[in-house]
C-alpha cells in the first residue's frame, strides 16, 4: 500500500502536465485558423472532427507512454523494496548471533569457591550487549508484514538483555567506595534500585588483604577461595557480601523492594551529563537519575619499564586487583627471584610477605627504592631506618637510594641498571610506585580534574555536578582543616562512599571526616596514621616499651576484625591541654628498638598528622587533636592521652 501511494504521488503531476500540454496545442491550432472552437469539441476529443484527429492521437500517445513508464517505475520500485526488505530481515535474523558473540567476551571467569560463585542469572550465556533502537515509523510495516502477502513474518524475538536500560542510582566502579555507597543508599531508601558497574569480573571486595593477610595463609587453595585468617585467627572472605546478597541485573527493574545489582566485566567509556546517561565499551547506553563515580585508580608504572619491550613487560606485575594477587602468588612459587621497586606501604608490605615465604623456599626477594629507608616519605628518618632493618630481618635484600636508569631482558633474566652503575638481575619485577586516579570520564562529562593532586574536584558534599558525586581514591575534596586533598586509603573509601550515598538520597552533609590508614609489616609490627604524614615536616616522637598486646595480632583479637578502620568509633576523645608556647620539644634520642609510640607531624607549630606506632584503637583521640588545630606546649603530655605508658 505504501508503494502504490508513493507511485501515484510521483505519476499524478506527470499526467496533469501532459493533459495541459494537449489542451494548449489544440488552442493554438484554433487560433491560427481564425476559428473559435466550440465548447462541445473539448468534451469529445476522442471522436472529434476529421481535422482534429492528429491532436487526439498525440494525446493518446502521451497518456499511453506515461502509463507504460509509470508501470515500469512501479515494478522497479516494488522489486527494490522487496530486496531491501529481505536484506533488513536477514540483518535482524543475524543480530542475535552477533550480540551473543559480543556477550561471551564479557562473561565472568569460572567460579572460584563459595564466595566467588555468581548466580546462574549473572552468568547465563544468553545475555546480550546493547539492544539497538527500534526501527523508524516508516519501516514498522515492513518489519511486521511481508509486502507481497501482507501477512506477518517470523521475525526472531530479541535476545534478553543482561542489565536494565535505566538505573535510578548508578554507581561506576566496583570497589569499597561503591559498595559503601550502595549500602548507605539502601539504608536511607529501602526500596532503592542500585546498579554497580565494574570492569572487573569480581563482586565488590576489600583490597587490603591482597597485600597483607592472604600472603600468610596456610591454605594452599587460598587463590581460589580468597578466604584468609586474620591475625586473631578468625576466618573471613575478601568479598563484602556473598552472591546471594545481590539482585540479578536482569531482575533489578522487576524486584519488588529494590536491591543492589552488580554488572561485572563492563567499562563505562563515556558520560552524557546533560542526557543523564553513560555509554559502555560495547556501545550500550544506560540512563540514570543519580550517579556516583568511584573508579579508584590504576597502578603507576616506570617509564623505563614501559619502554623496555614485551619481554620485560610480561615479567612485570602492577599490583592492584585480585588477578594481580593470583599472578604474583604463582610467580613466587615458579621463579627464583622477585624484585620489588618501591619503598612505600604496598612495596614494604609485599616485601615482608614474600620475604616470610622465602624462608621455606629458595626464593630471593629484593626491594629497592630511591629513599634512604622503607617508607622514607612517611616516617621520620630514625623510624624509617628501624623499619628497614625489620624488613631485612624478614629475609629481604633491601637496596636503598636506588634510582632505576634502565631495564632490559638478557640471557633469560631481567636486568635493572641503577643510576650509580649497580646492576640487579632478577626473574620478575613488581612495580609498587604509586597510584594514578582514574579520571578518563572527565573529558566526556566535562568534569574538572585537580592539577595538583589529580582526581575529580568536588565540593564539600562530594558533588562534581548537580546529580553526580565522586568518592574514594578518585575524589579530590576540600578539607576544612588541612586544605584540598586526595586520599588513597580504605577508611576514606568507606566513609566518603557512605557519605556520598547519603547525599545521593538528599542528606546534603559535608565531608568533614579525617580518614585514617594503616599498614602491617606482618603480624608483629603495624601502625595507624591520620592527617598529613610527610617526613619532610617537623616531627615529634614519643615512645614507650611495648608489651605483648602491642601488635597488629593483638589489636585484631581485641577488636574482632582485621580491617581496623571497621572497628573505629567516633567516641568522645579527651580534651587536650593547650599553650601558646611556640617551640615543640626536641626529637627523642634514637633507640635500637621502638616498641610503641606516637609521632606528631607539625606545620606552623600545629599538629596536622599523627602516626600511632603499634598503638591501636586510639584513632578518635588523634582525630580530635587534628580537628582542634591548636598549639601544644608539651607534646609529651599530649602523648599520654594515648595511654602508651600503661602496662
Image (spheres, rainbow, N blue to C red):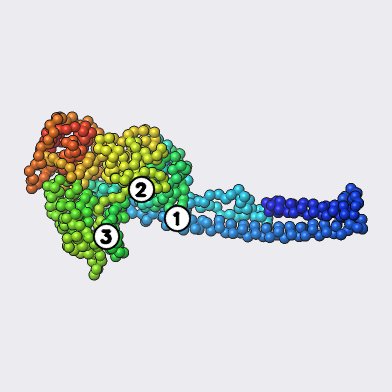
Look at 7% across and 43% down and name the residue there.
589
Residue 29 showing in the rendered view: yes
Where disc 1 sits, the SS reads: helix
What crowding class fits label 2: few (fewer than 14 Cα within 10 Å), some (14-19), or many (20 or more)? many
Residue at 43%, 57% in the rendered image: 104
Q: CA distance from mark 1 to mark 2?
A: 26 Å
Residue 304, disc? 3
Tell me, for residue 439, which label it has, or none.
2
Total count of labels: 3
Local SS, label 3: helix
If the image is split into quadrants, where does the C terminus sit? top left
List the residue tagged with mark 1.
Answer: 103
The image shows residue 531 at horizontal and vertical percentages of 22, 40
Q: Are the residues at dot 1 and dot 2 in contact (C-beta closer than 8 Å)?
A: no
Q: Could you tell which of marks 3 and 2 lies nearer the N-terminus?
A: 3
Mark 1, Cα crowd under 10 Å, few <14 / some 14-19 / many 20+, is many
Amino acid at each position: 500500500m505504501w508503494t502504490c501511494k508513493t507511485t501515484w504521488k510521483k505519476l499524478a503531476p506527470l499526467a496533469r502536465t501532459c493533459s495541459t500540454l494537449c489542451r494548449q496545442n489544440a488552442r493554438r491550432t484554433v487560433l491560427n485558423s481564425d476559428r473559435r472552437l466550440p465548447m462541445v469539441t473539448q468534451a469529445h476529443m476522442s471522436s472529434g472532427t476529421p481535422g482534429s484527429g492528429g491532436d487526439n492521437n498525440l494525446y493518446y500517445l502521451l497518456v499511453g507512454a506515461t502509463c507504460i513508464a509509470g508501470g515500469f517505475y512501479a515494478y522497479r520500485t516494488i522489486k527494490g523494496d522487496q530486496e531491501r526488505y529481505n536484506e533488513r530481515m536477514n540483518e535482524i535474523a543475524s543480530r542475535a548471533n552477533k550480540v551473543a558473540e559480543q556477550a561471551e567476551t564479557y562473561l565472568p571467569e569460572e567460579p572460584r569457591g563459595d564466595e566467588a560463585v555468581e548466580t546462574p542469572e549473572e552468568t547465563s550465556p544468553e545475555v546480550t550487549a546493547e539492544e539497538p533502537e527500534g526501527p523508524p515509523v516508516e519501516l514498522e510495516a515492513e518489519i511486521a508484514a511481508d509486502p507481497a502477502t501482507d501477512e506477518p513474518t517470523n521475525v526472531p524475538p530479541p535476545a534478553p538483555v543482561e542489565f536494565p536500560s535505566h538505573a535510578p542510582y548508578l554507581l561506576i566502579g566496583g570497589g569499597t567506595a561503591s559498595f559503601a555507597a550502595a549500602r548507605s543508599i539502601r539504608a536511607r531508601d529501602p526500596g532503592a534500585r542500585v546498579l554497580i558497574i565494574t570492569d572487573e569480573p569480581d563482586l565488590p571486595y576489600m583490597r587490603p588483604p591482597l597485600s597483607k593477610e592472604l600472603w600468610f595463609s596456610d591454605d594452599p587453595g587460598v587463590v581460589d577461595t580468597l578466604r584468609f585468617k586474620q591475625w586473631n585467627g578468625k576466618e573471613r572472605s575478601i568479598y563484602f557480601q556473598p552472591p546471594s546478597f545481590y539482585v540479578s541485573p536482569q531482575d533489578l527493574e522487576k524486584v519488588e523492594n529494590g536491591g543492589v545489582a552488580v554488572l561485572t566485566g563492563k567499562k563505562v567509556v563515556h558520560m552524557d551529563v546533560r542526557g543523564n546517561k553513560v555509554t559502555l565499551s560495547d556501545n550500550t547506553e544506560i540512563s540514570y537519575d543519580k550517579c556516583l563515580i568511584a573508579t579508584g585508580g590504576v597502578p603507576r608504572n616506570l617509564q623505563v619499564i614501559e619502554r623496555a619491550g614485551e619481554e620485560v613487560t610480561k615479567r612485570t606485575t602492577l599490583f592492584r586487583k585480585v588477578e594481580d594477587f593470583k599472578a604474583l602468588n604463582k610467580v613466587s612459587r615458579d621463579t627464583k627471584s622477585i624484585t620489588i621497586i618501591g619503598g612505600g606501604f604496598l612495596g614494604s608490605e609485599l616485601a615482608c610477605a614474600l620475604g616470610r615465604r622465602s624462608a621455606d623456599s629458595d626464593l630471593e626477594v629484593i626491594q629497592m627504592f630511591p629513599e634512604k629507608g622503607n617508607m622514607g616519605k612517611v616516617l621520620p628518618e630514625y623510624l624509617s631506618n628501624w623499619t628497614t632493618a625489620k624488613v631485612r630481618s624478614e629475609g629481604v635484600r633491601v637496596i636503598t637510594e636506588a634510582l632505576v636508569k634502565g631495564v632490559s631482558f638478557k640471557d633469560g633474566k631481567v636486568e635493572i641498571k641503577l643510576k650509580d652503575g649497580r646492576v640487579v638481575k632478577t626473574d620478575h619485577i613488581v612495580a609498587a610506585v604509586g597510584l594514578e586516579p582514574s579520571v578518563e570520564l572527565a573529558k566526556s562529562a566535562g568534569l574538572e580534574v585537580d592539577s595538583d593532586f589529580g582526581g575529580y574536584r568536588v565540593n564539600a558534599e562530594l558533588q562534581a555536578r548537580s546529580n553526580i558525586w565522586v568518592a574514594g581514591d578518585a575524589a579530590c575534596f576540600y578539607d576544612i582543616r588541612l586544605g584540598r586533598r586526595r586520599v588513597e586509603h580504605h577508611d576514606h573509601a568507606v566513609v566518603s562512599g557512605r557519605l556520598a550515598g547519603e547525599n545521593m538520597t538528599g542528606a546534603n552533609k559535608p565531608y568533614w571526616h579525617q580518614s585514617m590508614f594503616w599498614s602491617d609489616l606482618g603480624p608483629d609490627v603495624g601502625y595507624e596514621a591520620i592527617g598529613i604524614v610527610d617526613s619532610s615536616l617537623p616531627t615529634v616522637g614519643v615512645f614507650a616499651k611495648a608489651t605483648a598486646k602491642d601488635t597488629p595480632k593483638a589489636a585484631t583479637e581485641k577488636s574482632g576484625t582485621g580491617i581496623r578502620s571497621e572497628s573505629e568509633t567516633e567516641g568522645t576523645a579527651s580534651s587536650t591541654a593547650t599553650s601558646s608556647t611556640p617551640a615543640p620539644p626536641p626529637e627523642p634520642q634514637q633507640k635500637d628498638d621502638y616498641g610503641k609510640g606516637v609521632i606528631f607531624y607539625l606545620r606552623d607549630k600545629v599538629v596536622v598528622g599523627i602516626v600511632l606506632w603499634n598503638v591501636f584503637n586510639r584513632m578518635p583521640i588523634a582525630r580530635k587533636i587534628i580537628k582542634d588545630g591548636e598549639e601544644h606546649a608539651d607534646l609529651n603530655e599530649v602523648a599520654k592521652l594515648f595511654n602508651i605508658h600503661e602496662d
